[in-house]
Image (spheres, helix red, strand yellow):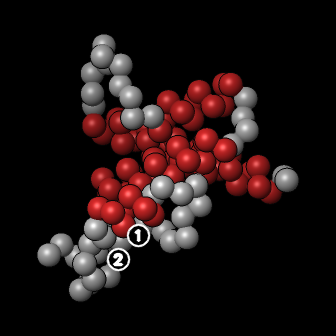
Amino acid sequence: MQESRAEEGVPYPEAQDFYDRSSKAWPEEGFEDLYWDDFIMAAGRVARRKLDRLETGPYQRALLRWGVTKKVDVEDERVPVLQQAMEYTGAVGAMVMDELAYVHE
């Protein structure tokens, strides 16, 4: 049994739990119990949900969408570290834009 990253003795979240938690624009709990690869995937999933409801200009939307997209052009070489960095940066950008929109409402 793999243990949670956050708490010893607690089992690692199951795939369905991971999927359910990351399917919301505002998850009720964080992802401290996930290991890095799963955390990046969860952050990207949440960011994609945020972008679906966020009102931004075309430039901002394209910039953030490229960061959290799962699509890769056939011509592009897949570089896993770069993909993770872009997804993490896109997720942070989407979170910041969402927070700014909330504060200025």
* Horizontal side, residue 69 vs residue 60: left or right: left
Tell which circle, 2 or 1, labels the residue nearer the N-terminal end: 2
SS at circle 1: loop
- Give the residue at mark 2: 6
In this rendered view, identify the residue nearer to me: 6 or 46: 46
In this rendered view, identify the residue nearer to me: 89 or 34: 34
Q: Position of residue 39 (x, y in %)?
A: 38, 57
Q: Is residue 77 above or below residue 61?
A: above
The residue at the far left in this view is 1
- Which amino acid lies under the numbered mark 2 shown in the image of this protein? Ala
Q: Is residue 82 above or below residue 43?
A: above
The residue at the far bottom in this view is 9
Q: Position of residue 53 (x, y in %)?
A: 66, 44
Query: Which corner quadrant holds the N terminus?
Result: bottom left
- Give the residue at mark 1: 32
Specify whether residue 35 is in view: no
Q: Position of residue 43 (x, y in %)?
A: 46, 53
- Which amino acid lies under the numbered mark 1 shown in the image of this protein? Glu
Crowd band around label 1 with a 10 angstrom C-alpha radius: few (<14), some (14–19), many (20+): few
Specify whether residue 40 is in view: yes
Q: State the residue at coordinates (55%, 70%).
A: 28
Q: Badges 2 and 1: C-beta atoms under 8 Å apart?
A: yes
The residue at the far right in this view is 105
Crowd band around label 2 with a 10 angstrom C-alpha radius: few (<14), some (14–19), many (20+): few
